[in-house]
Amino acid sequence: MGLRAAGGCVRSGETGRCAPAPEKRGPREWDIIETEEHYKSRWISIRILYLTMFFSSVGFSIVIMSIWPYLQKIDQTADASFLGWVIASFSLGQMVASPVFGLWSNYRPRKEPLIVSIFISVVANCLYAYVHVPASHNKYYMLVARGLVGFGAGNVAVVRSYIAGATSLQERISSMANTSACQALGFILGPASTDEVQFPQGNIDQVAVLATNVLFFVILFIFALFETIVTPLTMDMYAWTREQAVLYDGIILAALGVEAILIFMGVKLLSKKIGERAILLGGLIVVWVGFFILLPWGNQFPKIQWEELHNNSIPNTTFGEIIITLWKSPREDRNEGPTGCPIEQAWCFYTPMIHLAQFLTAAMLIGVGYPSCNVTSYTLYSKILGPKPQGVYMGWLTASGSAARILGPVFISQVYTSWGPRWAFSLVCGIVVLTIMLLGVVYRRLVPFSVRHGRIQE
């Protein structure tokens, strides 16, 4: 796609360089005329959206690692299963809002849904900050607050649709990678309409669209369940206190954010050599290896909560020692809470612990695979759709990701609580294998709109 710039030259959408205007145009070109002023305005708008994604990610990262300790503090009746629903409520709100905001942006200026969504996010975060104030039912207030925060985060569809519509094919992968890099940078630091164009004829490959939505769903599903289970898992396996879990898991999340930025920059270069499909396949394989490493092996078991009390309650212990133990334990645990694997989880007695080095290695691999799959999946998606309006389609893509963030936390919290990490991560490995098989089936169909209709060579 060529963009005509001031001074009698064409700003190429394929290369971004200014070259002399051709005398004749082929019948299959759908260039638009663009002045230098419009070119600069377009990129200012895109960079503002980068900043929007950055601040959204900062807010998310500040909260995500502290949800579990905060929930335990404000409502003692909340358990790990309810944590899954709290985290899922964010994505439920986002899933509902994404198609709405996407459709809205197709017919009205994009600034309208962006302003409304930001206002909702501010109000919802204020509500979340004060969920400890009511005398009872605090966990349900948190559930509602997180749902509203997620509804405000539905503007991701608007951001992606604008960037997809305002960039050429060659600019697309770089712009999408920069968007993801801004999101990743937000994770670290947290712990304008376009001109009318004549669109080309041709139908969108609906099979490729559906398959990409499924792939994106699985990618977000996997990462959502991983970020959900990190805090409960480390507290159970390593007997970390709530404060330690928030600190150490926050450091791990920040490190993954740094890793993600490097991956996004690498994807921009690597995609030019091997293409997005190959990177997507490689990323899924790396994710599978990461979760396989997370499977518990060996004969060392996690510390059980209250084991000190049980060890002291032997026949030789005097009555006075038992009274002193019962008196001291609640006072000592009032601030920190009991540490170790809860006795209510039966698997704690027979499931080997996941060693810290094992966990960190798996986290590093997942931190490589997830950003690779994430950026390439929605870059491929935007290319499959072509230059037609993408607001609704991007809304459905974001909705599929939100559905994944609903089901992922609920799935992992239920399976982990009932059957433990061995079953949970084995099922995840199985899901990734099925996803790789799906990618193999549709691999040849995941091509850009213009390639499919023979307008440019792949």
Image: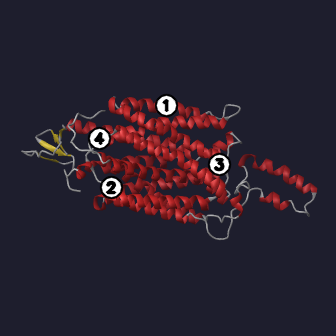
Instruction: Tell me the tag on residue 427.
Output: none
Front residue of 72 and 262: 72
Q: Check disc 2 and give the amino acid type.
A: Lys
Mark 4 or mark 1, earlier in chain: 1
> CA separation, marks 3 and 4?
42 Å
What residue is disc 4 on? 165
| Circle 4: element type | helix
What residue is disc 2 on? 268
> CA separation, marks 1 and 2?
34 Å
Question: Which numbered mark, 4 or 1, is in the foreground of this view?
Answer: 4
What residue is disc 1 on? 120
- Looking at the image, which residue is at 25% across and 46% down? 168
Residue 145 in view in this figure: yes
What residue is disc 3 on? 80
Mark 4 is surrounded, within 10 Å at the Cα level, by few (under 14), some (14 to 19) or many (20 or more) other residues, namely some
Question: Which numbered mark, 2 or 4, is in the foreground of this view?
Answer: 4
Give the percent coordinates (x, y) of residue 21. Answer: 10, 44
Mark 3 or mark 4, earlier in chain: 3
Question: Which numbered mark, 2 or 3, is in the foreground of this view?
Answer: 3
> CA separation, marks 3 and 1?
28 Å
